[in-house]
Image (spheres, rainbow, N blue to C red):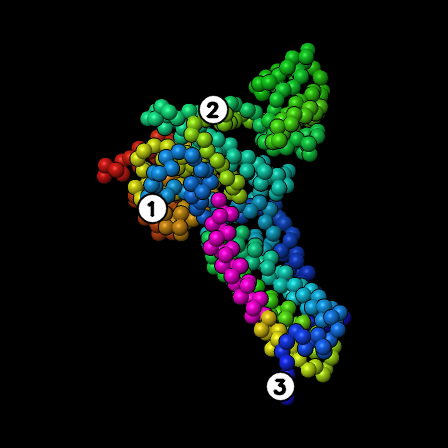
Amino acid sequence: MTKNSTWKSLKKDFAIKDIFDSFIGAFILATLIYAPIAIILVELITVLMYLLTLLVIIIIISLFVYVFCIFYFWWKSLVLKKQEINTDVKKLFLKTAIITNIIVLILGLIFLFVMIPILWV
Amino acid sequence: MKVLTKYYKKIILVLIIPYLIFSFLLFARIPFAVYSPGGISEVEDLIDIDYNNDKIIEGSISTTYIMAIQRPTYFQFILGTLSPYASISTLSTTYETYTNKEIAQISYLDKETSVDASIIIAYTYAKKVNPEIEINYVVKSLVYGKAEYLDHYDEINFGDEFVKLVGDDGYEVTDISEISDFTKNLSSYDFTFKNEDGETYTVSLSKNPEYNKFGVTLKEYAIVDDSTIYPTYTEKQSNIGGPSGGLLQTLAIYNHLIDEDLTHGLKIAGTGTIRYDGSVGYIGGVEQKVITAYVNKVDLFFMPSLDSAYTHDNYQVALKVCEKYGINPDGWLIPVSSFSDAIAYLEGLDES
């Protein structure tokens, strides 16, 4: 039997409160892991300013990982809460993470090629 | 939330110690300064002059900035030590008592006043060839330094204008050179300042018994009179501080005001403060600035050269930096002692 991979089916499997609670947990855990990495990258920029473009690209890539981490922990939290799920959460979250990362990529490129030249006067 | 914490409990516990170590390295600050290469910034992006708008400037004139991190974190300090292009020094004694925010305020004050100086000099030079240009300025005494013992420390801000003080025998002092002569009898005097919003305020400042000083450093600056200037200009908000862009700002403004294009299609950069008489002043961070210019592939780089016999002369230091990194300085690194030198060099390019 193929499982559904939609938010609608996920809402049938879990109460909104559980989904939200899992998300908050995943967000906090992923942020705790990512925060030092983000600060390291920002401090790297302050010293290695001449590598700005490269470092901003690394920050964008690190944000991809951060987004995937949030979705991974979110999935893990839901799976730990309930064993029998009719939704293909992995597939659903993977799709959402990819869409989120495309948005991150677009915003990152706008920042790199439009905002930095405007702001850095 | 609880499920995740429970599931990853062991990992979280194991990671607490490295996490604390990282937090310490990333947040604890030490009294040093790290200087590293930065970038170049086109003057046209900073100062917009409403004149000669049809003129095509084929090249570009840029200032060079470096990253100066006062009181770096341990991590920044380690990076600075490992980076081949960065240099580390102890925190300047001038800055020891200031917070990083105050150091930034001083730096922006330097930048703003250097733009005024650039405008005054560039317009004055351009007026010689174009009489329709108009420039006037007023001399103002601005707060440039504050000692720890200064009364009303938080009320008086960097850049506030000194208006007057009521001195001995009720004499009204408006000239800062007279302050010491008319503040001998009492221990405290009423100072009037004007803040950046144009509001005046009066504070009573006492002399510190140990130093016999009020604790406020005032410096005279020539500020452009916006009401009479022609053509008008707009200065955009800059996040790069310091006065070292003075020479290049002056060059770019001058180039905008005259008919010819001094850039000759070249990517011109450089460094050096500008004084009101048109002479150029020394700057810090020569090594990082030379590297920045080289990395950014500029065609010409102006460097202050005031005394070739002086070991720390910027140009002499820059030559050594070029040698160290295998950069050919011939025709690239240009020594200048004044704004006129820079113009003469660029005009000379025309002939050659």
Report the predominant secondary structure element of the magenta stretch.
helix
Q: Which residue is mark 1?
A: B299
- Report the front residue among B175 and B196: B196
Crowd around label 3: few <14 · some 14–19 · many ≥20 (10 Å): few
Residue B94's spot in the image, x, y percent? 58, 36
Residue B243's spot in the image, x, y percent? 49, 36
How far apart are the alpha carbons under marks 3 and 1? 64 Å
How far apart are the alpha carbons under marks 2 and 1? 37 Å
How far apart are the alpha carbons under marks 2 and 3? 78 Å
**What residue do we see at 44% from left, 25% from top?**
B135
What kind of element bears circle 2? loop
Asked if residue B102 is among those painted magenta in the image, a careful observer would answer: no
Residue B259's spot in the image, x, y percent? 32, 33
What kind of element bears circle 3? loop
In this picture, which residue range is highlighted in magenta? A97-121
Asked if labels 1 and 3 touch by Cβ distance under 8 angstroms, the answer is: no
What kind of element bears circle 1? loop
Q: Residue furthest left?
A: B352
Q: Amino acid at mark 1?
A: Asp
Marker disc for residue B257:
none
Marker disc for residue A2:
3
- Report the front residue among A42 and B87: A42
Q: Which residue is mark 2?
A: B228
Asked if residue A106 is among those painted magenta in the image, a careful observer would answer: yes
> Can residue B277 be seen at all in this image of the molecule?
no
Quadrant in which the C terminus of chain B is drawn:
top left
